[in-house]
Amino acid sequence: MDELNLADAAYYQSLIEILRWTVELKRVDICWEVSMLSSCLPLPREGHLEELFRIFTYLKKKHNTEISFDPFYPVIDSAKFERQDWSDMAYGDKLKEDLHV
């Protein structure tokens, strides 16, 4: 992949900024992709720009997509979970020394 020229690199950077704002304004479904492409800001290449165009195509197709979260906490019966002594595991002796047991 060839590096972008200065004009295309500036265009790439402006598109990244648009997508960052889009993520801030509740499109968290593209957060990882935008983050990964943001890491290429110092030296974007042609393939990176093509991937940005794919994200914009996705947003155009899925413009009404929402992620909803259930605001209620689940009811969990803690009696179903047995208490365990994990002090023998991995760093058991070191943990006991740190805790002065």
Image (cartoon, rainbow, N blue to C red):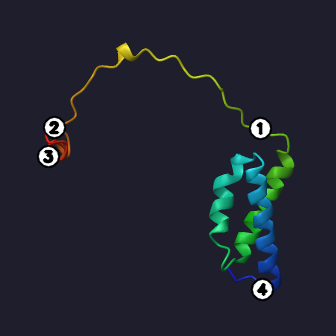
> Residue type at mark 1?
Glu
Between disc 1 and disc 3, the foreground one is 3
Left or right relative to 70: residue 49: right
Q: Image height check: is 11 above or below 74?
A: below
- Which quarter shows the C terminus? top left
**Chain-order first, disc 4 or disc 2:** 4
Q: Residue at x 82, y 75 (%)?
A: 11
Determine contact: label 1, label 4, CB under 8 Å.
no
Pointer 3 residue: 97
- Circle nearer the N terminus (1, 4): 4
Of labels 3 and 2, earlier in sequence is: 2
First in residue order: circle 4 vs circle 3: 4
Q: Report the residue that reaches farthest toward the bottom.
A: 5
Q: Which residue is mark 2?
A: 88
Give whichever of discs 1 and 3 has the lower sequence position. Answer: 1
Which amino acid type is marked by label 2?
Asp
Q: Seen in the image, is 82 located left or right of residue 58?
A: left
- How far apart marks 1 and 3 lie (CA) works out to 50 Å
Classed neighbour count for the residue bearing mark 3: other residues with Cα under 10 Å, few (<14), some (14–19), many (≥20) = few
Which SS class for mark 4? Answer: loop
Residue 73, given in percent of the width and then of the height, sits at 57, 23
Residue under label 1: 66
Residue at the extreme front of the image, as rendered: 100
Q: Can you identify the residue that label 4 sits on?
A: 5
Nearest the camera: 6 or 22?
A: 22
Dot 2 and dot 1 residues touching (CB under 8 Å): no
How far, Cα to Cα, is label 4 from label 2? Answer: 59 Å
Give coordinates of residue 97: x percent, y percent: 14, 46
